[in-house]
């Protein structure tokens, strides 16, 4: 199992690495640390000697980062390249067939500056593998459940399968959350269909579905996260309407990237 952890050697990135290790260790996996050296505008730094020092410094920091985890039961590799971080990470994930990309954020205090139009959002748009976004205050050891947000479409089956596999790898139970925005027979039928799919394809998996009634899906997710902190919320990026609502509301972004709620985004 290959997990990419994007790093800029900050505390946020080191915290995200703890999540990557917690996941990879369960199956004797591999962590690939990826660092992008962004374009440098200073002509004094752009010279060969200046860039060589930047690469040498990055290599030293990589080795220091790996040395901080001598007891991790997994293999480490690292990649240092010049370029845009989102493109480097997404390309690497595709080339090595990574299972997951992990990236840290600054938490609620800096979420707008960090996410809107930033490396994280660009990475979400470009990456073809799931991305785990880890707020700085979140701790891997505190995560108790993985919760998959659903909209009841046929294409969600592959996300259900992936989320169940991930929860089993990590030894965390999987639950589901659905926001019902209206009284609709199709909504009730979707719940029954979900239960049937899990029972038929994943025998022995306990079923727990949280249903919230709200005007919009975003409001329902807000309610869920207010009551549930020690979770990873899994969402599907293909749900354009829901995703557009999230990105257009700064308060909702702050809630979804709450200090104790990492977000796992399925492409």
Image (cartoon, grey):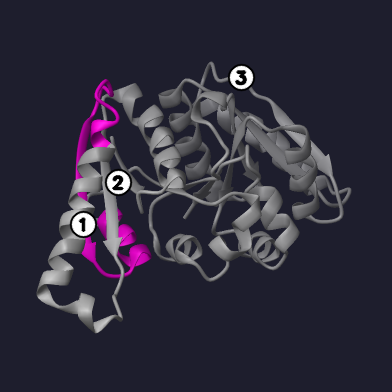
Vertical position of residue 55 compared to residue 219: above or below = below
Q: Position of residue 80 (x, y in %)?
A: 21, 57
**Where does label 2 land, which residue?**
98
Q: Earlier in the sequence, mark 3 or mark 1?
A: 1
Q: Can you name the residue that lies furthest to the bottom here?
A: 43
**Would you say residue 14 is visible in this rendering?**
yes
| Sequence-earlier tag: 2 or 1 | 1
Which residue is most to the top?
204
- Label 1: which residue? 80
What's the CA distance linking mark 3 and mark 1?
43 Å
Q: Secondary structure at mark 3?
A: loop
* Position of 87 relative to 155 (above/below): below
Tell me if mark 2 has few (under 14), some (14-19) or many (20+) residues whose alpha carbon lies within 10 angstroms of its own: many
Q: Locate residue 131 relative to residue 228 in the image: left or right.
A: left
Query: Which residues make up the magenta segment?
Result: 66-93
Dot 1 alpha-carbon crowd within 10 angstroms: few under 14, some 14 to 19, many 20 or more: some
Say above or below: 159 vs 141: below
Residue to which mark 3 is pinned? 206
In front of the other: 38 or 245: 38
Q: Is residue 173 visible?
A: no
Q: Which mark is residue 222?
A: none
């Amino acid at each position: 199992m290959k997990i990419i952890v994007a790093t800029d050697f900050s505390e946020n990135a080191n915290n995200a690495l703890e999540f990557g290790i917690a996941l990879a260790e369960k199956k004797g996996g591999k962590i690939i640390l990826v660092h992008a050296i962004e374009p440098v505008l200073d002509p004094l730094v752009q010279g060969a000697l200046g860039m060589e020092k930047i690469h040498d410094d990055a290599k030293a920091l990589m080795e220091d980062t790996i040395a901080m985890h001598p007891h991790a039961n997994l293999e480490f590799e690292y990649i240092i390249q010049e370029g845009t971080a989102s493109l480097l990470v997404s390309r690497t994930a595709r080339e090595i067939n990574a299972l997951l990309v992990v990236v840290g954020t600054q938490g609620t205090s800096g979420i707008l500056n960090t996410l809107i139009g930033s490396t994280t959002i660009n990475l979400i748009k470009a990456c073809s593998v799931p991305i785990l976004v880890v707020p700085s205050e979140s701790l891997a050891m505190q995560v108790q459940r993985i919760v998959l947000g659903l909209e009841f479409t046929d294409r969600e089956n592959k996300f259900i399968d992936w989320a169940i596999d991930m929860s089993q790898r990590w030894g965390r139970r999987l639950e589901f959350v659905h926001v019902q925005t209206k009284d609709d027979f199709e909504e009730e039928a979707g719940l029954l269909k979900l239960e049937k799919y899990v029972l038929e394809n994943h025998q022995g998996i306990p079923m727990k579905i949280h249903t919230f009634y709200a005007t919009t899906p975003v409001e329902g997710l807000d309610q869920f996260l207010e009551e549930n902190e020690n979770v990873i919320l899994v969402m599907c990026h293909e749900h354009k309407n829901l995703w557009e609502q999230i990105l257009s509301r700064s308060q909702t972004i702050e809630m979804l990237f709450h200090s104790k709620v990492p977000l796992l985004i399925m492409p």
